[in-house]
Amino acid sequence: MASFAMVLPSKKEEESGLSSYYNNKTTIIQEARVFNESPISPRKCRLLLTRIVYLLCVGETLTSQEATSLFFGTTKLFQHKDSALRQAVYMAIKELAESAEDVIMVTSSIMKDMQPNSEVIYRSNAIRALSRIIDPSMAQGIERFFKAAIVDRNPNVASAALVSAYHLPNVASAALVSAYHSFPFAKDVVKRWANETQEAVNTKSSPSFYDATIGTGGGGGILGFGAAPQPTTQNTIITSSYCVQYHAIGLLYLIRQQDRMAVTKMIQQYSGTKPGAGSILKNPMSICMLIRYTAKVMEEDSNLQRPMLEFIDGWLRHKSDMVNYEAARVICEMKNVSPQQLSKAISVLQLFLSSPKAVLKFAATRTLAALALTQPAAVATCNVDLEALIADSNRSVATYAITTLLKTGNEASVDRLMRQITGFMAEITDEFKVIIVEAIRSLCLKFPTKHASMLTFLSGVLRDEGGYDFKRAVVEAMFDMVKFIADAKEQALSHLCEFIEDCEFTKLSVRILHLLGMEGPKSPQPAKYIRFIYNRVVLENATVRAAAVASLAKFGINSIDSALRKSITVLLNRCLDDVDDEVRDRAALYLKTFKEKPLADAYVKEESVFSLAALESKLVTYVKDPSSSTQAFDISSVPKISRSQAAQDASRPSTLDTIGVPTTKKASDSPPPPTAAEKQSAYVQQLAEVPEFASYGSVQNSTEATELTETETEYQVSCVTHIFAEHIVFQASNIHPFNVSNTLPDTVLENVSVIMQDQIEEPTLTEDFIIPLPTLTSSNSPSIIYVSFSKNEPYPTGSFACTLKFVTKELDPSTGEPEQDGYEDEYQIDEIEVGAPDYIIPNYVTFGAEWDRLRTSPSITETFALSSMESIKAACDSIIEVLNMEPLGGTETPTSTSVHTLQLSGLVPGGGGKVVVRCRMTFSQGAGVTLELGVRAEKQEICDLVLDAVGG
């Protein structure tokens, strides 16, 4: 019996590890002459086509000429009637079409197999292949074929058409998943298939029928793979999977995704008249897809959360475990979920914990482990069931169970859990070891008095075999213990010293040496670490040696022991003879700093660095400004950040291209949002393109975008404020002050402007001009409007009432052109506030040193009663938001519920200088928070600005 895809490997192939399909492409291209033989051998051709597909799937690339030659050689096989060969041809065509040229020429052959009177097995394959080769301009010509196929009574044909609609004609898409994120170029054509797609969802025929051709000659199968068939008969195979609904509901969402109201109606329609019951959706995967769309709607619009939650609550009681879990998972991942709603989801997951199905236990424990990070008390109700899973034969389930217990357990259970963890660490992979270590890392901070047992465990696994990610997780956990648990510092540093004696990972050695340099000099006996550090100079590679030299220098500079300083000087002198120039240069530099204290303060003790992104932005502005050549670059205007924050910023990708109108939250797989410095750079570039702002000079600061309308309204406006030396500019656009969007597809707005009226009696700003938007349609949304004001004082504050004014014109549905006559209209939007956060940018400093430096500068102290604040933490968050300043030394997280001191630092660009704020707070029930606000700045105006922001 010949087979298309099933060839058992020989013993020699098993030993060599090579598949029987493995050949280099030269051999396959030479053997392609079998396509030209007469008569055609279906068996030989099937095997060769299999090898071609295999070659492409393992990553082999073909040149355009090679792919074209194979492609058209393959198309010659259309004349043969062997059904298995025809399927192999279609599979090869789909793979080769991405690299071959002139693939459109085979369209006529494929179209023949798409006819309603063709074999079912041919129709579905032809539809899939056609979607990969069709030209976008021809999409309308094949529309009727796809519409008919979508509503075909055969689920195989309908599913093929629906899935192809995702790809049509995006030939670059290789899978359904990727098509979700790259909707086809012919989307306007596909959008017209909404009625047929909805009909496919609504199909109520009880089980579906799948007609497959089975050869009577033997060797055939449901898919037609096998020997060449003899005269055939039709055999009907019953299936009740309703998979067509899954494909149709996904396509229907893509068609309607820009219309939130339509998506909401779709959810309501297919959820049934009663939440969770009466739905026409029979396929569990389609219901899971609908649940995800429901979650997305709730995420985008909080006003719809309550009705959508009713549907999800009903799905918790669905007969399918898959649907139950998806509904529970969505509730667990929601923000601001109530305890009552959460308890229902946890109850469902708790039932899964006792299920005999390993996949249900794994899904439930993983979800509970994630939920325990934010809601440990709610998950604690499952602790009894979770403890029973610690001994589960599936170690993945056991791992998640024990990590969840670590997050939800009490202090008394820590020792018992640590003993149980030790028992199976050797039986799990590094991936799950990392999960356990992360849980222990959190537990250390939760129960610091139990640090001894946890540190013993971490030091033990640090000596075990493991990869870089696992060892890095253990080292990070120890770093946190050094940073946050004073009693554990000495012991943790000792364990880290022992680890670098036999550490195979250079990155970890360098990080540990840096930590030793920072924390070692503060210990009671700093000399005990010198031996471990100098051993690295003698035994390690150049990178580690350079890090060891830097660590030694920190001991010499920061230690008050003169004998230790002298010993380190001797060791550094030995490093001057190192074979690596980096090691020699560092040794020479640090020896120099030993002799000159100002150098030591600047190059060794300095804890902050300039923000590179902000520095780049200001340098670009400085170079582009013709008038800047008359004065030196002001480095003091560049904000400083901590070294840890700089390292974090350096490790994240640049995302300037993600800047846009703030609408909905990005999906989890989207790029991270841009940093403030990246946004600032983008703002500078856009403002530079407006001639009216050429004389304004450089932008001192740009605020975060503020929404001025609700997201579900017909007009969406957001605002960003740009601060110049003598002007303030507001704007409506993609990334500027006003971001204006028209969500009405049948109207066009002309001469769009924003009218701003100052709300105070003595205006501190004078309007200069408005740059209106000539035309705004739903297709060119969002667009930009600018409003410019001149300052009447250095730091004006106030609020503006805003009105969107425009001329509305209807679009002619036949021509798409706006009508001649329109009418003036206006739309009230939210007020815009101008205050301290618009002028101050966060800036990292050493608070004690900066507070002392400004002791002779302007200062002010005032006491406030914040009676509405329910805790010191709430007061800290509010003050940081109101002032837009950098919290220092971890003071944004209070360690006491009754007394706390918040330390803040900021920078006012344009000559305003630095400002530091000390907030002393006390809290008592009934009275709220009492705040003593102390401000020191380089200018009195800045002190007043900060005071007004808090007092207002």
Image (tube, grey):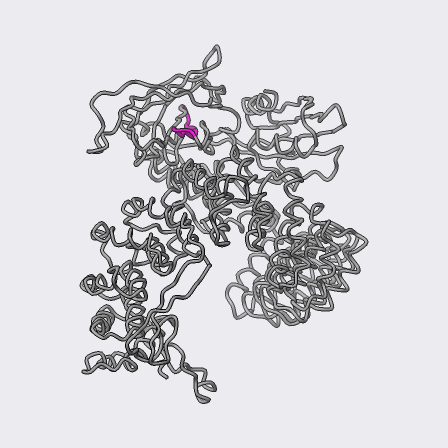
Q: Position of residue 608 (x, y in %)?
A: 57, 45
* Quarter placement of the C terminus: top right
Residue 876 sits above or below residue 166 on the image: above
Q: Quadrant of residue 775?
A: top left
What residue is rendered at 32% in x and 69% in y?
91
Q: Is residue 207 shown left or right of residue 173?
A: right
Residue 543 sits above or below residue 930 on the image: below
Main SS, magenta region, reads strand
What residue is rendered at 72% in x and 25% in y?
928
Q: Position of residue 812 (x, y in %)?
A: 22, 30
What residue is rendered at 62% in x and 24% in y?
859
Instruction: Decide whether residue 556 is among the magenta residues.
Output: no
The foreground one among 707 and 15 is 15
Magenta-tinted stretch: 713-726
Q: Position of residue 673 (x, y in %)?
A: 47, 44
Instruction: Decide whether residue 716 is among the magenta residues.
Output: yes
